[in-house]
Amino acid sequence: MLPIDEVMPALLDALAGFDAVVLQAPPGAGKTTRVPLAVLAQPWLAGQKVLMLEPRRIAARNAALFMARQRNEPVGQTVGYRTRMESRITATTRVEVVTEGILTRMLQRDPELHGYGAILFDEFHERSLQADLGLALARESQQALRPDLKLLVMSATLDGARIAALLDQAPVIASAGRAWPVDIRYLPPAREHWEAHLAAQIPRLLAEETGSMLVFLPGTAEIHRLVRALNGRLPGDVRLAPLYGDLSAAAQDAAIAPAPDGERKLVLATAIAETSLTIDGVRIVVDAGYARRARFDPGSAMTRLVTERVSRAAADQRAGRAGRTAPGVCYRLWPESERLAAFAVPEVLGADLSDLMLELAAWGCRTPADLCWLDVPPAPACQQAVELLQRLGALDPQGAITGHGKAMQGIGLPARLAHMLVTGRERGQGRLAAELAALLSERDLLGVRQGTDILHRLACLRGERRESGVDPARLKRLGQLVQRLAEGAPQRPLASNEPGRLLAAAFPDRVARRRPGDAPRYLLSNGRGALLDAHDGLAGEPWLVAAELDGQQREARVFLAAALDQADLETDFAGQIIEQERLDWDAREGAVVARRERRFGALVLDSRPLPDPSPEGLLAALCEGLRAQGMQAFPWQPALRQWQARVMLLRRLEGEVWPDVSDTALLAGLENWAAPWLAGVSRLRQLERFPLGDALRQQLDYAAAQRLDVLAPPAVAVPSGRQAAIDYCDENGPVLAVKLQEMFGLTRTPQIAGGKQPLTIHLLSPARRPVAVTQDLASFWQQGYPQVRKDLRGRYPRHPWPEDPHTAIATGRVKPRG
């Protein structure tokens, strides 16, 4: 008896009374294989079929096989399954286990879903994009067309109450978890890399523990490295088996099957083994604690794979694999003190939404928020997806699906690949497009070490080239996919330019032109950078289409590409090539460069000098260059800098009645104050004759200019009778630098700006060096002057040093000799 059996009566009662129910059952409860058969026996189903959604192909196939065995029937009789690549469904099948894309296509073809009485969403906690979409479409179908349709959302770790609230407070049935306890132990690496630590610990743990072992790793690369690291280090009774999505069905079955008598298994798996699979005999789980996920970067419009720490929910799922058939133990390769995120980010919040928006357009929905979502798709990502689909011709300017979009949507491929396939069929290259789509819809057949040229993959797929390490089962599966997509189109001799043309149709934003220089660096049509390995076979190509990149912000590394002829680009994208005047600032030449260019996105197809650029364009480019140079590009005179500082002082004291004439403000407003004198100017050296004083002083009207001279005069009279200049450019405020003897008799510090700003007095020696700095002359004469007199009168005897500076006559003269 499994834990789910205890709540089965309550679950079936809820389904009989409500149109939607939530089942919360932790790993090992038995929900995947028990619930569909129990629902099948309910009278309210009235002879209709049960549809169960599984997120992974291996889980769908194995769930169907297990349920068929429970009924002592072959798969396809009462219980069958459908995936993209395989179908085991007959006229007698009443329980269909399908992968996520299949459900969406079924609903699109028949929104009423005739003949089906219940849809079961298994492992909904994984929150895949297709599961969220499937639930949204099924819920609208139920509410608008099929009130008798039952929806059952089954989750191992997700908050059931939140799903229930989404489904109008649907009842939540909770089941106990696994039948056997699992002991959690933490085994973090000390200093070495976690992969080396794991390779060292596995033989030790196998020697200490009984039973088979399941190891969770982020991806196939880590699996292959660990296989090599464990070579010759395992006990004799241990049989090693990898488990990941690209393996053949036979290899996956071998990994899941019980170990032969007298042997144990060591299964090295990706996240594929987290859910809906029971691997007989496993009582040891080792969790590296990482998962590899696709993350879409809206800035670069690229999806990249990232390796990140698993969520707490995923870690619990993995640990549960050890307690399926007996008490088990789970070793975690991170410290117990490390805090994990409760759940992984739902795919709908971090994925490329072009496929979703195409499906919604086909459904007749232009506003995603109108449907039922646990997390509403983000509006910016939706808009970006719509723009791509419009560029591909799948949506019209109003966002409605076009005939081309309908053809794309019915294929069941990602939007870019579906567009390429439809385009290939229209050009008579349907089979080549199918081959390219098959290659791009799966993990790279050869790996990046074999270069980036997709022609090599095509040759392997066609059997024209043999490469070591290529899995024959994968080749067979890809061949089957090609047959399905090609729809009987014949294979034609391969013209070297055709793959690039078709890839450009799918990835117009990733057409790339080689940058000048020795390194194989490229500029993409979306404005991003990309690079190839210097030894790559495509490194010398002037034009490429980058089908797969790593999505790095600065320069993305190209993984798969094809050469492209510029002539093909200009033919196929004639409507997207624009001709424009281009005026740019050349910092090296110190001049505006004017050219007429033809461009495809950020890529320049050709460029020629523009002899008569528009005055507006010339001014804009010149101002751009001047902002980069700064105001020092203009012919400043010291008096103008003083004028600027005088105006800024009054602006600080009196506010915005005075204009902002700082360098920052002047650069920002070049087009306003400098434009009348910049007509015809295109080079820095022409600014030598620029009338900067006239241009700046026009910022003040006549009255303001008069007030400026009164409130912030260029000079003030000192007691000696001389007009002494004020330095307004000192960072500490306006400075009056004057010989000490010229200030005799003055006790009140001079002020400007109507008394708001005292001057800082620099009292100078006869050698014009400061002997005192003060804003309080009275205090200086009283306290500082006696010491200055003592120090300097012997050194400068021809200058007066009276004992009482208050009554002495100010002078700038010296005593006569003699």
Image (spheres, rainbow, N blue to C red):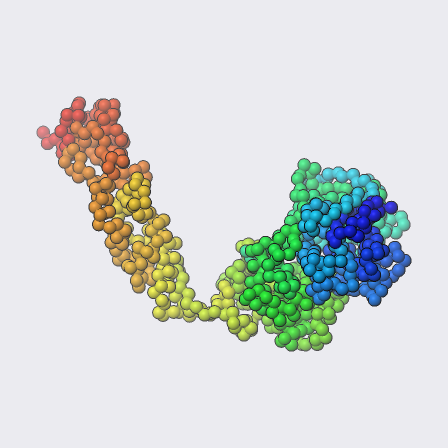
Residue in view at x 17 percent, y 39 percent: 723
Residue at 83% across, 52% down: 34
- Of 384 and 133, the residue lying toward us: 133
- Residue 54 picture quarter: bottom right
Look at 36% across and 70% down and name the residue there. 611
* Position of residue 354 measured from the top left corner of the image (x, y, whole percent): 61, 61
Q: Residue at x 81, y 40 (%)?
A: 181
Above or below: residue 751 compared with residue 682: above
Q: Quadrant of residue 465?
A: bottom right
Left or right of 764 on screen, residue 299: right
Quadrant of residue 796 in the image? top left
Residue 490 position within the rendered picture, expressed as x and y whole percent measured from the top left: 70, 76
Name the quadrant of the C terminus: top left
Compare residues 180 and 579 and report the one nearer the observer: 180
Q: Position of residue 645 (x, y in %)?
A: 29, 44
Image spot of residue 656 (x, y percent): 32, 45
**Residue 492 horizontal side relative to residue 261, left or right:** left
- On the question of residue 67 being in view, the answer is no
In depth, the one of 40 and 270 nearer the eye is: 40
Q: Is residue 20 visible?
A: yes
Query: In front: 254, or 515?
Result: 254
Q: Number of numbered discs present?
A: 0
